[in-house]
Amino acid sequence: MPKEAIIPQQPRHRLTTRLWHWINALCLLIMLMSGLTIFNAHPRLYWGEYGANDDYAWMAVGSSDRIGYLRLGGMRIETTGFLGNWQDSEGRTQKWAFPGWATIPSGYSLADGRRWHFFFAWIFSIGLALFMIRSLWNRHIQKDLHMRRDEWRPSRIWRSLRNHTRISAIRQSVGKPYNVVQKLSYIGVIFILLPLMILTGLTMSPAMDANWPFLSDLFGGRQSARSVHFLTAFALMLFFMVHIVMVLLSGPLRQTIGMITGGHGEGETR
């Protein structure tokens, strides 16, 4: 009987995916830290078109002489030493919303924060557009992220979620096609969260607001767009943290090398 010919294994992560992954990681980190600098200029969030100190803010980071606090609606949480009231490396008490170690630049400068944020926002936006075009061309989206009809069943989604709580299942998933939870996560990030970040960012720009006023209407006002922008950034940060935990549980060295060199998926026979 003829022996089965083994098809050479193909890289699990295409070059464009790997480049986009690392460029995205850098851009999002810098945009997050520079965004916190911008937020420090007015650490309050509103809904609607307008918002100022005398208006009701659904979220605010504040401080007094001795304490810092985070207020969410009517709930107030003391955050002394972390938010609102903290000490810098020289032991001096500072009252910015977010501490210097979490911002770019580490000292408060709204102008520099904007420069860092906008520069890397353009890199991020262009990279996302090129990734989308390339993914449609090489069928990455259709092959790796397409949800089959049976994968939309609640029982299938629940089973995949439960597997994500078992370390053995997480380790066995390395090198295999994306499971349901991975597909839904990447679809949510690529097609919902990332475009939301770009659109809400454009909505907050006075120049874009003047040329494309429909964006402000789309989000219910510039202050609403700012709130959605902040919440989307928070969701992306949660995704990033869960992603890091999954990498650590499944073998950080192998996963990191795979995202650098491409790695390999399961071989096929014919």
Image: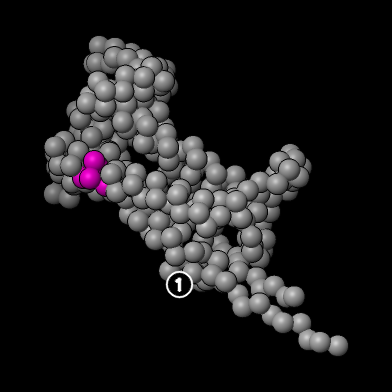
Give x and y (percent) for residue 206.
22, 24
Q: Quadrant of residue 57?
A: top left
Residue for badge 1: 261
The reply to whether the magenta stretch includes residue 34 is: no
Q: Nearer the viewer, residue 81 or 30?
A: 30
Q: How is the image coloured?
A: one colour
Give x and y (percent) for residue 251.
54, 68
Disc 1 is placed on an element classified as: helix
Q: What residue type is disc 1 on?
A: Thr
Work out whether 99 lies above or below 57: below
Q: Which residues are magenta?
A: 116-120
Q: Residue at x 42, y 34 (%)?
A: 196
Q: Nearer the viewer, residue 139 or 186?
A: 139
Give x and y (percent) for residue 28.
35, 48
Q: Residue at x 69, y 72 (%)?
A: 268
Q: Residue at x 36, y 30 (%)?
A: 200
Work out whether 124 lies above or below 11: above
